[in-house]
Amino acid sequence: MSYFVHESSFVDEGSLIGVGTKIWHFSHIMSGCVIGESCNIGQNVVVSPDVILGRNVKVQNNVSIYTGVICADDVFLGPSMVFTNITNPRSAIIRREQYAKTYVGQGASIGANATIICGNNIGKYALIGAGAVVTKDVPDYALLVGNPAKQIGWVGEYGHRLEFDGEGIAVCWESKQQYKIEGEKVSRIK
């Protein structure tokens, strides 16, 4: 096997798991999901059918990733964060055909105990604070906190808050990467 699975976990037939991925205690990887290379699946995680996880995705303990979720490369899913896949669930009514899609962009991080309401997309390198409840699409590089989540700023690819000068330029103190803000959009320029 080109990946590691703890003996207490279950990997169903028909799932595809990339080289170097590690699946830890009491997790269940369901048939039809795709997990990229070098991912880390924490303890007590469920990955449902048709979920796609890119390369180097880190899933912390107690996360359920439901059908309809796609995570790009380098995504971080914090402990006990929650995805939903239907907006009006009822126990007695089956709505599998109505599962909404949720896309999490490259390098985005979702904090512990955050909730992502289905059908909303998270932009690349966005940072969702712990406990936030995301009820709408999140722009690239956005920093959101609260319930409902509100944008309070911007972050760079290293996760540090960006401070823009009078010309709309910010420099990350750690990476030295440069970013430009234009209206409600941030992009990396160097």
Image (spheres, grey):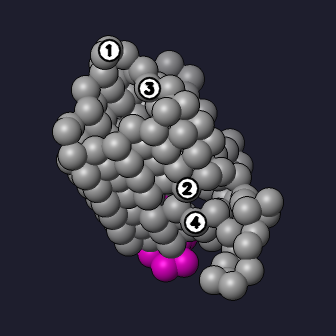
Residue 124 on image: x %, y %:
55, 39
| Residue 116 marker | none
Q: Which of marks 4 and 1 is nearer the N terminus?
A: 1
Dot 4 amino acid type: Thr
Residue density around tag 3, few if under 14, some if 14–19, many if 20 or more, within 10 Å: many
- Tell me residue 189's x, y (percent): 56, 23
Secondary structure of the residue carrying numbered label 4: loop
Q: Distance between the residues labelled 2 and 3?
A: 17 Å
Q: Earlier in the sequence, mark 2 or mark 3?
A: 3
Q: In this view, does 67 lie to the left or right of 46?
A: right
Q: Do the residues labelled 2 and 4 touch (CB within 8 Å)?
A: yes
Alpha carbon separation for disc pair 2 and 4: 7 Å
Closer to the chain start, of discs 3 and 4, is 3
Q: Name the residue under label 2.
A: 66
Q: Distance between the residues labelled 1 and 2?
A: 25 Å
Q: Distance between the residues labelled 3 and 1?
A: 9 Å
- The amino acid marked with disc number 2 is Tyr
Q: Where residue 2 is drawn, which disc sits there?
A: 1
Crowdedness near tag 2: few (<14), some (14–19) or many (≥20) residues, C-alpha within 10 Å? many
Query: In the picture shown, does residue 84 fall above or below 89?
Result: above
Q: CA gap, disc 3 to disc 4?
A: 23 Å
Q: Name the residue under label 3.
A: 17
Q: In this view, does 78 lie above or below 14?
A: below
Magenta extent: 144-150
- Percent position (x, y) of residue 135? 63, 70
Which numbered disc, 1 or 2, marks the residue that appears first in the sequence? 1
Q: Mark 4 points at which residue?
A: 84
Q: Nearer the viewer, residue 146 or 2?
A: 2
Cα distance between the residues tagged 4 and 1:
31 Å
Q: What residue type is labelled 1?
A: Ser
Q: Which residue lies furthest to the right in this view?
A: 97
